[in-house]
Structure formats: C-alpha cells, structure tokens
Image (spheres, grey):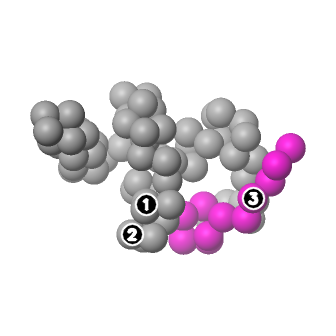
Amino acid sequence: MASERVPKYIVWSKGELDLSDPWQRRWYIQQVLIHGRAEDVAALDWEEVRRLLPELTLPKDVRRLWESYFDSRRSR
C-alpha cells in the first residue's frame, strides 16, 4: 500500500489515501475537481481525468466545465 498524505481541504475524513487503489484514486480525483485549488487540479494527470470523467459524481457545473474543456481540446 502506497499511502499519500492529502490536504485536509480536499479530504477531511482521512490524512492519507492509497492512491494505487483504483477506487480511492478515482474518489480522490473527484474530490480534487470539486474542492481542490488550482495547484491541486494542475497536479492531476489530465488524461486520467478525461478517461474517468464519465464515472465521476460531480456537480453539474463542474462536469460541464470539464466536458467543455476536453471537447475543445479534441476539436483542435
């Protein structure tokens, strides 16, 4: 298990997550997209975010933002 410390403003219920666990990683990415700061979002693997986006439970506005972003990159 490769536990990593995570900021309290993103995950307040635990101090560490096992980001090698696919469920915990997906949940962490979801939390970063909802609660993270710009530097937290910038640190994500954006290809992984694009791939996982359909599986994430996000507020409508957050989902729309990311879908628009990836749609605009695809059309370039």
Query: Which residue type does callout 3 highlight?
Result: Glu
CA separation in Å, label 2 and label 3: 19 Å
Query: Which residue type does callout 2 highlight?
Result: Ala
* Residue at screen point 60% across, 61% down: 11
List the residue tagged with mark 3: 4
* Residue at screen point 65% across, 33% down: 22
Region in magenta: 1-11
Residue 6 location, x and y as percent? 66, 64
List the residue tagged with mark 1: 41
Q: Is residue 71 visible?
A: no
Under tag 1, what secondary structure?
helix
Within-10-Å neighbours for mark 3: few <14, some 14–19, many 20+: few
Mark 3 or mark 2, which is nearer the start of the sequence?
3
Residue 40 location, x and y as percent? 48, 65
Within-10-Å neighbours for mark 1: few <14, some 14–19, many 20+: some
Decide: marks 3, 1 in contact (CB < 8 A)?
no
Quadrant containing the N terminus in the rendered view: top right
Decide: marks 2, 3 in contact (CB < 8 A)?
no
Q: Is residue 37 above or below residue 71?
A: below
Give the side of residue 67 with respect to residue 33, left or right. Answer: left
Give the side of residue 17 with respect to residue 29, left or right. Answer: right
List the residue tagged with mark 2: 38
Is residue 6 inside the magenta stretch?
Answer: yes
Is residue 69 inside the magenta stretch?
Answer: no
* Residue at screen point 27% across, 50% down: 62
